Structure formats: C-alpha cells, structure tokens
Amino acid sequence: MSIEIDILNGDAAWKIAEPLHQAVWGPQQVADKPWRDVKWANADLRVLIEAPEDGLVCHVGIYFRTITWNGQKVHVGGIGGVCTRADRRNRGYATMAIDAAVHTMRANEAVRFALLFCEPHNVAFYQARSWLPFEGEVYCEQPEGRIRFDYMAPYVFNIVRAPTLGTIDLCGLPW
C-alpha cells in the first residue's frame, strides 16, 4: 500500500479537507450531538492522508495555542477534526495521521503537552495510543462568552509533561 502524508497550512488546505470533513461531520451526522452548535477553531495545520487509489482518506487538524493551566500560561498543541472516510476505517490511517500530528507538535519546542477532546466511543482508541484523561475542568470561548467545555472528554498527551488534574482555559475557541 502506497500512501502520501501531507502536513499543510490549515486555511490553505481547508478546500482539500472540507469534502471529507463534511462527509464525516456534516450537519446530518452531528444533528443529534450535544456539541452540534459549538463554534470551533480553525486548524493551524492539517495532516492529510491520501491513498493513490482512493484520494483523501483521513484528516487531522493541528492547533497551536497558549492556554492557561491552573492560571499558568502554557503553550500546547491540539488535535481536532479527526475524520476518516467511512469505507476506509480500521486500516490505520487515523493512527498514522495522529502520529504525524504529534511528531509535528514535538518539533515545536514550545509545546508542553497535546490536548484533544473525544466522544465516549473513541476513548479506547486514544488511550491505546497513550493519551491520558484530563480529570479537571476545561473552559473555552464561544460567541456568547466563556463557558465550561464539557461536551466531550479532554485527553492529554505527554510532550514534556501531561497534566491530568486542574483547570484549563483554552483562551479561545475549542478544537
């Protein structure tokens, strides 16, 4: 199997990623989700996996942000918008894309840990890849103001450290 992994500028690559993102996370697919009305941040970078015979099969957004953890400023990397074409799941694409995203975050020497949010059905997937549950509170911005973000479970990945308790403020939109 020959695949191509590209890591591209988030805004510039959106037109490539959007059809896949809409197929997996479009209005019909999220209509019953508690987070359906959340305003999300745009990715800084995008990991795109293409298979020659299938085109774009997987996407992972990468986010860089200075947040606060227990009142201290911390530069983190985030992962969001993970999606794989329905007919190409369980082939390792998401694992490859997440690994590429983590590798990219590690290359940014300021990043202390990675953060993502996941639904219950994805917990085992992320835990099997060394992501740890963050047991504290997470806050973010939304058009109506600052809110507690409890729509999905937060998970952290150890870059320099992996805090699992306390209070995180995303200091912006969630990813």
Image (tube, helix red, strand yellow):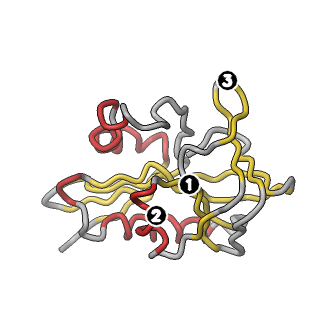
Residue 15 placement (x, y as % from top left):
36, 38
Inspect the image, locate mark 2, and give the three-letter code of the amino acid beneath it: Val
Q: Is residue 115 left or right of residue 46?
A: right
- Marking on residue 153: 1
Residue beneath disc 3: 144
Q: Looking at this view, name the residue that lies furthest to the top.
A: 144
Residue 164 sits in which quadrant?
bottom right
Label 1 vs 3, first from the N-terminus: 3
Please tell me whether mark 2 or mark 3 is closer to you in this view. 2
Q: Is residue 164 left or right of residue 100?
A: right
Residue beneath disc 2: 123
Q: Rate crowding at label 1 as few (under 14), some (14 to 19) or many (20 or more) other CA atoms within 10 Å.
A: some
- Marking on residue 11: none
Nearest to the observer: residue 166 or residue 140: 166
Label 1 vs 2, first from the N-terminus: 2
Q: Gap in Å between the C-alphas at discs 1 and 3?
A: 22 Å
Give above or below for 125 relative to 85: below
Inspect the image, locate mark 1, and give the three-letter code of the amino acid beneath it: Ala
